[in-house]
Image (cartoon, grey):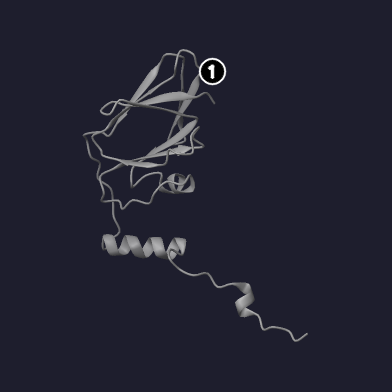
Amino acid sequence: MGSFCLRFLRMGIVLSYCRIILATPCGSTAYNMAAGGPLVHPSVPALLFTPICPFSLSFRPLVLPTDVQLLFKVPLEARCTVFVGVDGHTRFELKKGEGLEVRVSKYLISYVTISNFSGVTSWYKNVKKRLNWNEKPIKECEALVEAPY
């Protein structure tokens, strides 16, 4: 996997990465979280940017506004080309000097929700239940009775 540069068009920041995850709060949550990215409530309009094994330990995952435009560009001096994967299905190659611009679509999609879903409260309950969020695990040694010596 080759390295590439990322430029935040509004801020003029250039960064180098080996791999990243771009996600929305409703999509790619498990992959994003497994890579150290944040959990973000589905009603928050955001683009999640999570580097995987960045070349610098000082750069952490970001929660970006939905109006940001990202430009990925393979430097001409790169050692190899870069492959881009989209939702694990589509894969294409960016050659040296080529780029890819990413932005959130202005078109929204509708999706089906469960009728007993009660918004924020239900989301927090699901996170707590499925991830044992903010719960102290019971240690095996606490459950065992000490044997006399």
x and y, in percent, of residue 60 in the image: 42, 41
x and y, in percent, of residue 9 in the image: 28, 26
- Is 132 drawn above or below residue 98 in the view shown? below
Mark 1 secondary-structure assignment: loop
In the displayed orientation, state which residue is furthest to the front.
58
Residue occupying image coordinates x 44% and y 48%: 33
- Can residue 115 be seen? no
Side (left or right) of 110 relative to 128 = left
Residue occupying image coordinates x 52% and y 23%: 2
- Is 11 drawn above or below residue 143 in the view shown? above
Residue 68 in which image quadrant: top left
- Can residue 104 be seen? yes
x and y, in percent, of residue 102 in the image: 32, 28
- Is 18 drawn above or below residue 111 in the view shown? above
Please name whichever residue, 105 or 111, is drawn nearer the observer in this view of the structure. 105
In the displayed orientation, state which residue is furthest to the bottom.
148
Label 1 sits on what residue type?
A: Cys
Side (left or right) of 79 relative to 12 = right
Residue at the disc numbered 1: 80
Residue 58 in which image quadrant: top left
What crowding class fits label 1: few (fewer than 14 Cα within 10 Å), some (14-19), or many (20 or more)? some
Please name whichever residue, 6 or 89, is drawn nearer the observer in this view of the structure. 6
- Is 37 drawn above or below residue 81 in the view shown? below
